[in-house]
Amino acid sequence: MSVFGPLFRWDEIEVALSDHARIQGMLDFEAALARAGARMGSIPAAAAGVIETCCVMSQFDLAALARDAAPAGNLAVPLVRQLTALVREQDAEAARYVHWGATSQDAIDTGLVLQLRAAIDTIGAELDRLADALAALASEHRDTPIAGRTWMQHAVPTTFGMKAAVWLDAVQRQREGCAELKRACVLQLGGAVGTLAALGDKGAEVAAALAEELGLPLPDVPWHAQRDRMADVATRLGSCVGTLGKIARDLALHAQTEVAELLEPAAEGRGGSTTMPHKQNPVASAVVLAAATRAPGLVATMLSAMVQEDERGLGGWHAEWETLPELVGLAGGAVHHLTEAVLGLRVDAARMAANLEATQGLVFAEAVQMAVAEKAGRAMAQRLLEAACRRAQVEKRHLREVLAGDPTVGRYVSPADLERLFDLGRYVAAAGPLVDRVLARHAAARAAARVPMA
């Protein structure tokens, strides 16, 4: 792992994406191919046993594989060469049946699919943790008032529970989408051009047995140059990182000194500065936002790589090898770091209440305008409230005071009605049922998956 690995990545995902896992995935393909071939009678059972015993990463020279991949054009060629040599040392006859009926892309693609399957499961489980953490926030702060902001300015009051519920709703959709990605994890076995001609009349049987051995779905046809499944993984993960980035952006905005409504977890050495001892920077937000900045370019590369030539692509397939793992790694790191931040998030409800008062009642202008509009019409109501808001700002007075002294407004809104319209609890009450609906959906999804909430 690079020096930046712990910052942007997550060990749980990096294990699945490591060079060791990549090579072992290809070896798992080769071992399973030998077992499947033996089951279907295309290679001797004794040969399959020897091949399987040699498909262990510790027996391979990774440096030599990397060096020899350059002139070969892919990793499978030197891998099969090393595997064949290892098998030959034990049984010269068995060495004849290494990689029997397959092509390089079969081993590389299926090895990648095995990596993706593990990584997708891990990311999905972490999205569950994030959803649970957001659900806890939404429930605890269901009725905690906060200024709603549009175009980065105060709009009207809402609740922090509502904000967390909106985050949760989006994360839940991403979790559902992530689960669907398992459909992309299918076997690749087609031989030279996808017909499995080298296996004669055993091709379909060996493919089915291999799929069973690896626990992978068997596609109707090989997909060497049809990369929509890999593009689906990329686009879904890109969307997921974008969703996480939106939450991180909100956390960072609310952590600003002038706002200070939310703060990331505090710990020794976390978010510090080399020169400013008072700083506690929102480091998790920065990491997630960095991932959200990098992901679109990686997704674009994967989409561009879909346009491949005939039965086997030249260059487009190769472009995926580093791009997709990088995207998966960034997505896994982003969801993990954001989950940890949300679990330790510090919420300052008192600061939220104080910030609501910063504009001296202007956040209630909409409520008053709607009440006036019922009697005077929308156009008249908007003119009256815009003028009152300008007076309140220029004169630095509370909007309620300005409205109470306006005889024209008084014709449409009584003092008692005005008091009611400035009741914060009443104004944000509409958010509660929406929060409840999102929480109920989350609980139902967790129950359906039979996963206990953290």
Image: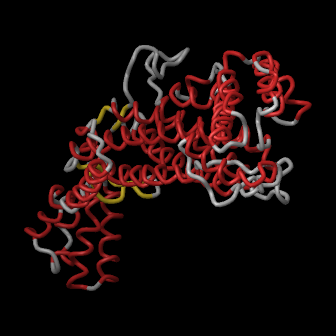
Query: Foreground: 92 or 3?
Result: 92
| Left or right of 396 on screen, residue 86 | right
Q: Based on the displayed image, in which of its 4 quarters is residue 94 positioned?
A: top right
Q: Is residue 400 left or right of residue 284?
A: left
Q: Residue at x 78, y 47 (%)?
A: 317
Residue drawn at x 65%, y 51% as measured from the top left: 205
Give the camera-side residue of 230 and 211. 211
Q: Position of residue 80 (x, y in %)?
A: 79, 30
Left or right for 128, reference 205: left
Expressed as whole percent of the image width and height from the top left, the position of residue 75 reads 79, 32
Residue 40 location (% of width, % of height): 65, 44
Protein image colouring: secondary structure
Query: In which image quadrant can residue 65 be found?
Result: top right
Q: Residue at 31% across / 82% down in the picture?
A: 378
Q: Nearer the viewer, residue 159 or 404?
A: 159
In front of the other: 252 or 443: 443
**Total numbered circles:** 0
